Image: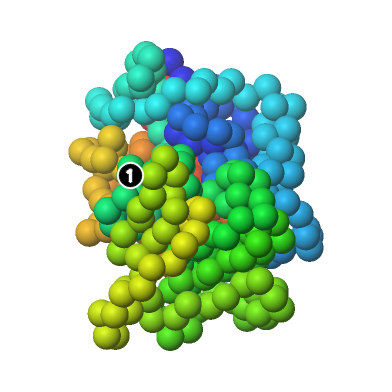
Amino acid sequence: MYDVIIIGGGPAGLTAAIYATRAGLELLLLEGGQIGGQVAASAEIENYPAVPHTMGWELASHMAGHVGDMHVPIRYESVRSIVDHGKTKTVETSEASYECRAVIIANGAKRRKLGCPGEDTFLGRGVSYCATCDGAFFRGRDVAVMGGGNTAVEDAIYLAGICRSVHLIFRRDHVTAQKSLLETAKSKENLRFVPLSTVTEIAGGDTVEEVTLTRVDSGEQTKLPVAGIFIAIGLAPDNAPFSPPVALDEYGYIISSEDCKTNVPGIFCAGDTRAKLLRQIVTAVSDGAVASMQAERYIASLGE
């Protein structure tokens, strides 16, 4: 019987583990992918307090090292469901079932899919959702990035440093990324902006050879020869395993306020998985600390 089980090994989950360990709670951290979450797959990070500039994998490594030094038990298993028994919960994974008094859901969110023909067909063969993971495979070649937010522009900047050309495709007439990122992107001579457009088909032979661009204002279509396309059009939660009993909003995010409580007593949430205004590393870390404190208080209230 664990005091608390933390689902997810990103910044929110790792922070929750640190605070829970310091509180003397018996805990288990479950991670279905890699420790560090999206941070580990990020390129440069420039907005984390006291760390003016670092690489995503480096920050994730430091966080993981902190948790490792505290001897937090980690099991790499995907969670399939949570069963609420009142004062206890059962967390069922792909490998086993675990009993606990409280749960902190910090599983983050995944990159959203474009949903066009060819996207699934060429996954891993020219279609990618992680520029820092797969960008090296396209060194010296022509690529495209779909999206106009911070992540898309960051990906485009990173790829411009190793690829022959980068086409940044976005649906609006302007990108929505931060001004500092936009200025850096504009300074890259091999980075071309393609506004008011979206990718409606991905085609090729064994690998991606071209994408079809469709103007959102006129419907006009053109073919763009590229060896790869990196899709960065936002995040999508993966909370189906937790609902029921946990309530989700219309977009699939866990309904919660700043207290990180869900509708189920003893189940808390932290980070990108919950409905919130801003999804950043710093807000995920904050959530992790709050959720851990709430879990500690809840367990104490059980009087066991």
Q: Quadrant of the N terminus?
A: top left
Q: Is residue 44 visible?
A: no
Query: Residue at left 44%, top 80%?
Result: 195
View extreme (front): residue? 205
Disc 1 element: loop
How many numbered marks does the figure carry?
1
Q: Quadrant of the C terminus?
A: top left
Q: Residues within 10 Å of mark 1 (few under 14, many from 20)?
A: some
Rendered location of residue 177, percent (x, y): 55, 74
Using the rendered view, name the quadrant where residue 268 is placed.
Answer: top left
Looking at this view, is 191 or 173 the one in front?
191
Q: Left or right of 254: which side holds 140?
A: right
The kind of residue tagged 1 is Asp
Using the rendered view, name the quadrant where residue 54 is placed.
Answer: bottom right
The residue where tag 1 is placed is: 120
Looking at this view, is 7 or 161 the one in front?
161
Query: Residue at left 74%, top 40%?
Result: 62
Q: Is residue 200 visible?
A: yes
Rendered location of residue 269, percent (x, y): 42, 45
Rendered location of residue 4, percent (x, y): 47, 28
- In this rendering, the answer to whether 69 lies above or below 113 is above
- In this rendering, the answer to whether 90 lies above or below 169 is above
Rendered location of residue 19, percent (x, y): 61, 38
Using the rendered view, name the quadrant where residue 223 is placed.
Answer: bottom left
